[in-house]
Amino acid sequence: MLHMIGQAIMGLIIGMIARLLLPGSEHVGLIMTSILGIVGGWLGGQIGKWLGWYKDGEAAGFLMSVVGAMVLFVAYRYIF
């Protein structure tokens, strides 16, 4: 249970940093920011695995998580 709460908090932090780094205004609430941050961490890990930076089962680093969240925010902006 605490692991899930920790992931949600880190997802929110990662999502907020990604929102600050991207130019333009995002009309996304805290819950969607947290979700995009959590999924961005997963996406950053996948990108790192594809590039050979991470092994299977290894968590993504903070910077790759932010990059993954930024990719999702750009995709979210174009979809909606």
Image (cartoon, helix red, strand yellow):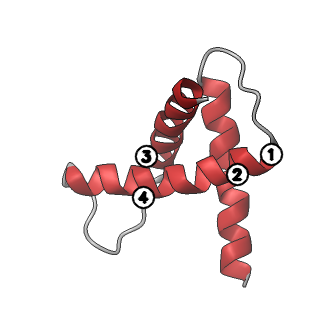
Label 1: which secondary element: helix
Rendering coords of residue 19 (x, y %): 66, 31
* Other-residue count near label 1 (Cα within 10 Å), few / some / many at <14 / 14–19 / ≥20: few
- Say whether disc 4 or disc 1 marks the residue closer to the N-terminus: 1
**Residue under circle 3?**
64
In this rendering, the count of numbered labels is: 4
Q: CA distance from mark 4 to mark 3?
A: 6 Å
Closer to us: 43 or 56: 43
* Labels 4 & 3 near each other (Cβ < 8 A): yes
Relative to 23, residue 72 above or below: below
Going 59% across and 22% down the picture, which residue do you hit? 22
Label 4 is placed on what type of residue? Ala
Query: Depth-wise, is mark 3 or mark 1 nearer the camera?
Result: 1
Relative to 75, residue 39 above or below: below
* Labels 1 & 2 near each other (Cβ < 8 A): yes
Left or right: 49 as drawn, with respect to 29: left
Q: CA distance from mark 4 to mark 1?
A: 22 Å
Going 73% across and 81% down the picture, which residue do you hit? 2
**Residue under circle 4?**
60
**Residue under circle 2?**
34
**Residue under circle 1?**
30
Label 3: which secondary element: helix
Quadrant including the C terminus: top right
Going 36% across and 70% down the picture, which residue do you hit? 58
Q: CA distance from mark 4 to mark 2?
A: 17 Å
Label 1 is placed on what type of residue? Leu
Label 2 is placed on what type of residue? Ser
